[in-house]
Amino acid sequence: MHRINRRSFIRGTSGFALALPWFETYSLAGVSPKQPEAPKRLACFYMPDGVPMPLKEDPAFKDWSWFPHGSGKDFKFTKCLDPLEPLRDDLTVFSGLSHPFARDVHGHSNADQFLTGANTGGSGDYQNSISLDQAYAQHVGQHTRYSSLVLSTDGGTGSPRGAQTMSFNRNGRPIPAENRPKRIFDSLFVKNDKEAARRLALSKSALDDLMGDARSLRARLSNQDQKTLDDYLQSVRETELRVEKAKQWLEVPLPVVNVDHLNLEVNPEDPRNYLRTMFELIFLAFKTDSTRVVTYQLGRENGVGVSDYLARAIGFRQTHQLSHETKKPGGWENFGKYCRFLAEEYARFLTRLKATPEIDGSGSMLDNTLAFYGSASSSFHLSRNYPLILSGGSNLGFSHGQYRQFGTGDADHQENAGISTDKGWRSEMQHEEAPLSNLYLTMLQRLGVEAEEFGNSKATLDA
């Protein structure tokens, strides 16, 4: 091969091929001296069930209230989010943002509108609109093999007001999410030639075949590219092993009974390992520029689906129960420990992006990636004051290292803190909040989309 570009493959003798990352050695061969511009990426993550919000006078407030203490640049993470401390200069925590149409919708039914801001309502007729990720995918999707990667722990679409996907097309129809790591891996990194009768098996022999060709290629690469290739292939190997371990958990059938009576004889292999696998696949998809748009819904609302088992990674029976047991002894702490578990795995993913340099020398992958993480519920399924974190994008004009509070009523222990019954969502708002779509419009514009409105917003945030 006299020239290798970012869409090339390592090709094994069996006819299978593995996608390659970008290499500086070949990016300039036979073309202009200008290096390729780093892609702008968007990744959105959803956590169900809201977050712990004890009252200020509660002993749990100091350590286990999800929102940080303080404001502006003078803030301190609690134990819920302190795994993100090493990344504090790369992120902003928001409070006081929500979707106006969802503020009187129960948290069991609100995930559908998290990235759309649409008036999906709590009952009756249902109509959604395009989601944030798909609005960006329309702008950038033609540059990559996949316009977007839609993932969730439960897979599929779910049902109206019971979404198992975060992504909705321009007609407001749900886009099915993939939840099986092997299928994701194959679709991203395995090319099926006409001569190949089967897909690449995730086995030592098949990968070793590709590794042999990789070693041959390695001799023609610069020192930096050799390290890039070695790191990349090691990531592939590690992902392969985690995919194999996660198979048993992924094959557990979705429950069809009330979650409180669920048969727990099922054996999820390793929920923490599953999350790491999904995050790693997202990283590899970005690293190879297979896509620049990803959504991952960690779980669906209402304690439905296999995602409700994620809390077993830290010794709890089910996830959704934790939000209902905050008034029991240690309840806030238990819920907070689950949020901390998610924060640990999310921090690992962000750190991976930050540690990986861009091919054009413009900083790290995180500097060109907007990573958005949050929920459409705050305290006990209340569709207000969403817990939100925006990370990365320093090359897109975002300034971080802040805790930003919008609207009113967000001082001290947060408005609506301490709610522990379903009656809370019916209460009238005693404060003001800003539309979350203001932030979405800001993000789209910083990503290069010439949009003047999104959702129900025509204004932007100074972020």
Image (cartoon, rainbow, N blue to C red):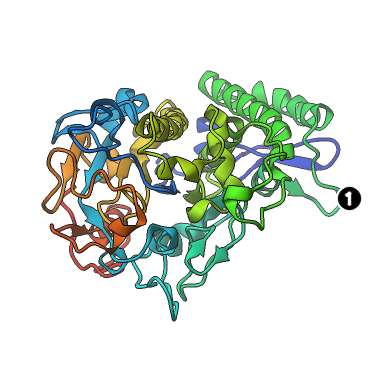
Where residue 356 sits, quadrant-wise, is top left
Residue 408 shown left or right of residue 276 in the figure:
left
Q: Quadrant of the N terminus?
A: top right
Percent x, y of residue 152: 55, 50
Q: Secondary structure at mark 1?
A: loop
Q: Quadrant of residue 454?
A: bottom left
Q: Is 187 on the left-hand or right-hand side of 370? A: right
Camera-nearest residue between 256 and 152: 256
| Residue located at (45% from left, 77% from top) | 126
Rendering coords of residue 190 (x, y %): 72, 44
> Which residue is tagged 1?
197
Q: Which residue is pictured at 26% across the width and 70% down the height? A: 456
* Towards the viewer: 269 or 60: 60
* Viewer-nearest residue: 321 or 168: 321
User: Residue lying farthest front?
Assistant: 328
The residue at the far bottom in this view is 125
Location of residue 199 in the rendering, given as x and y in whole percent from the top left corner: 81, 46
Q: 420 above or below 71?
A: below
The residue depicted at 56 percent of the width and 47 percent of the height is 290
> What residue is drawn where x is 25% and y is 29%?
89
Q: Is residue 154 at all visible to an observer of this figure? A: yes
**Residue 105 % position (x, y):** 34, 65
Instruction: State the image quarter where residue 100 is shown.
Output: bottom left
Query: Compared to 8, does 344 lie above or below?
Result: above
**Residue 224 to residue 103: above or below:** above
Which class describes the residues within 10 Å of circle 1: few (<14), some (14-19), or many (20+)? few
Say if residue 189 shows up in the picture: no
Instruction: Give the amino acid type for the residue marked by disc 1 in the picture.
Output: Ala
